[in-house]
Amino acid sequence: MTALSTPCQRLQIGDLVAYMDANGSFLRAIALPGEEVFRGIGFVVRDQHWGTYTLQADPQIEKTDDKITVRVAGRIDAADGALDWSLVWTMTPQGLSAVCDCTSVDGFPTTRAGFVILHSLDAARAQPIAVTHDDGTIDQTHFPDLVSPHQPFMAVAGMDYTTAAGHALRLRFDGEVFETEDQRNWTDASYKTYSRPLSKPFPYRITTAAPEQQRVELSFTAVAPASSAVSAAPVILRETAMPRLGIGVSPGASTTGLSDAIRALTPGFTAIEIDLARDPLLVQTRLILKAVPGTIRLDIRRASAEAVTVALGTLAPLLAGRDVIGVSLWDADAALIEAARRILPALPLGAGTGAFFTELNRGTAWPESADYLTWTSTPTYHGSTDDTIGESIGPLGDILRTACAKFPEQRFQIGPHTLGARFNPNATTAEGRARPADPDPRQAQTIAAAWMLGMLAGYADDAVETISFFEAQGQRGLINAEGQPAPAAAVFKHLAEFQGGRIAILSWPGQSRLCGLRLTGAAGVTYCIANLHHEAAEAVLPEGGRLRIDGFDTVWQQVPD
């Protein structure tokens, strides 16, 4: 195992390896021979809107021949209260333990304060597990194969399972009842066991009379030898048609320079997002429609059925003569789709969600009369490190399998995918739900291009009609506010040349952060490969030869006829 892109300190004792965040709050990439068994075990504190506090601390590390002990303490001073917290980590050749103590003199409001355990996807996917509940009963079950819409394990006090590589693990929890959710819903490459249960009220308050004290114990009942079998040759996961590629325009976006930016990017379509709460009379939307050239899709955020139908009536004459590939009515039911069909009889109508796959997966009554279903993604919902972005390509194949299994007769239009959330569907107030994440400075870096290619490689399929990314311009755009293209812009424009053609999706066994496309065009075969790891990598081509790819970067290689 190698260190992560986030500043970390490598800790090893016996066969156990882990990387500790600089503030001591998280152990990441926890590995036994030949396998990462946990993406991480960490202490987190979330605010009233599920935002994550940045913890400041200076860990103190003590090492002996048979034990590593790390002591950490810190304080959160927030506008609505202060929290004092402390941690003790203990690592031995037989396992590790983590203890946290939290208290507040003033009373500290939070939606979560305590430990989370991130079971690595490849180690745990579909593996048998014995779940011990807080009443002492034991269930023999499995980690989910398809993405579970709701918590697969509830009222958890302990877990015993063997990983894909053969490591036998035992987890025990004390101080709070835990439960497990399938984080692939948010494109995290893990299953997360956490406290406190979502069935309890939140936000809740930590006080001196009601402190938060938890303990996690991990032990290894068997450690398997490392496998030496690693294949360098790529595998073709599937061959498919290249979906139509789009770019987004957010509600209220500036129209200055917008036409030029879109023409420069040559997208297959532009997805215009409409927020009727912000623009009920469609004043801003009219300006954007005039500024956007070429093919469009309208994405209308959730609103009352009356507001949506009135808006559609206003939009109908504005769309006459335009090339419109769809009108997405996020969160629409069958009645709204039927009403929209009467207003826009000639246009494809979509349902689904403008939020994450989570919301689509948990929905039980998506209208079968819709012409397509939608969802979007962001890789930074649960974390913001480069490594979090890199891991987010891992679950995409499982998400696609789940969508096709759950909606076997349906078509999909996916996106726009953005580095930060365009809005937060899980915030506890209307203001919090509408607020977008701050612009991510990595939008202007090669990691955004690599992630975009990884998303395309993960989701491209014959059931997927379109995939869209980012915004056309601005701080969240492919072209910045000064009119300069980001690295992702060049990759997007090159990929757009292959829309409608046949492509092959490539994977490299043993190199989970490498992904690529084999593209066939008039000039022959071209490979586009992304490395979603911070270290440089080499990719073997099917015809032979190797390509070196820098960390969080992409390369193109044309194969001569």
Image: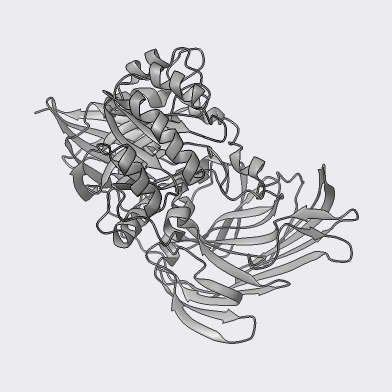
The residue sitting at 73% across, 72% down in the picture is: 175
Compared to 274, does 380 lie above or below? below
Residue 19 percent across, percent down from the top left: 59, 52
Q: How many marks?
A: 0
The residue sitting at 40% across, 35% down in the picture is: 312
Q: Nearer the viewer, residue 386 or 273?
A: 273
Q: Nearer the viewer, residue 200 or 74?
A: 200
Residue 318 percent across, percent down from the top left: 36, 24
Q: Residue furthest bottom?
A: 137
Say whether residue 188 is visible: no
Q: Nearer the viewer, residue 527 or 262?
A: 262
Which quadrant of the structure image shows residue 404?
bottom left
Residue 323 percent across, percent down from the top left: 26, 27
Compared to 395, does 260 lie above or below? above
The answer to whether 83 appears left or right of 110 in the picture is: right
Image quarter hosting the C terminus: top left
> Which scheme is used to colour this image of the protein?
one colour
The residue sitting at 30% across, 62% down in the picture is: 405
The answer to whether 366 appears left or right of 219 in the picture is: left
Say whether residue 126 is visible: yes
Residue 163 percent across, percent down from the top left: 44, 70
